[in-house]
Amino acid sequence: MTPLPKRKVSKGRRDRRRAHDGLQARNTVACANCGQMRLPHRVCGNCGYYKGREVIKIASE
């Protein structure tokens, strides 16, 4: 025989356990060079600039 819970888990306890399950949108900032939205502290994937200088070369089409 498998063990069973002695009491019903209350709505408050259940909801507190699930408090961290909500998804949050990623924080983005505008690139100072091209204005494209990018993650903070990352090189811009559109222009290749970070902190005002070119870090990677992006092939222009």
Image (tube, rainbow, N blue to C red):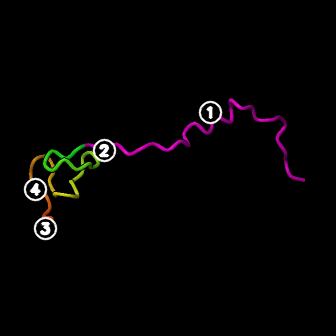
| Magenta stretch, main secondary structure class | loop
Q: Element under label 1? A: helix
Q: Nearer the viewer, residue 15 or 60?
A: 60
Tell whether position 2 is magenta: yes
Q: Is residue 47 above or below residue 26?
A: below
The outermost residue toward the top is 12
In space, the residues marked 3 and 4 are separated at their CA atoms by 14 Å
Residue 13: x and y in percent read 68, 32
- Circles 4 and 2 in contact, beta carbons < 8 Å: no
The residue singled out by tag 3 in the image is 60
**Within-10-Å neighbours for mark 2: few <14, some 14–19, many 20+:** few
The residue singled out by tag 1 in the image is 16
Marks 1 and 2, the one that precedes in the sequence: 1
Magenta region: 1-29
The residue singled out by tag 2 in the image is 28
Q: Is residue 13 above or below residue 51?
A: above
Pair 1/2: label in front: 2
Residue 53: x and y in percent read 9, 51
The outermost residue toward the front is 61
In space, the residues marked 4 and 2 are separated at their CA atoms by 20 Å
Marks 4 and 1, the one that precedes in the sequence: 1
Q: Amino acid at mark 4?
A: Glu
Marks 4 and 2, the one that precedes in the sequence: 2
In space, the residues marked 3 and 1 are separated at their CA atoms by 50 Å
Q: Element under label 2? A: loop
Residue 19: x and y in percent read 57, 36
The outermost residue toward the left is 53
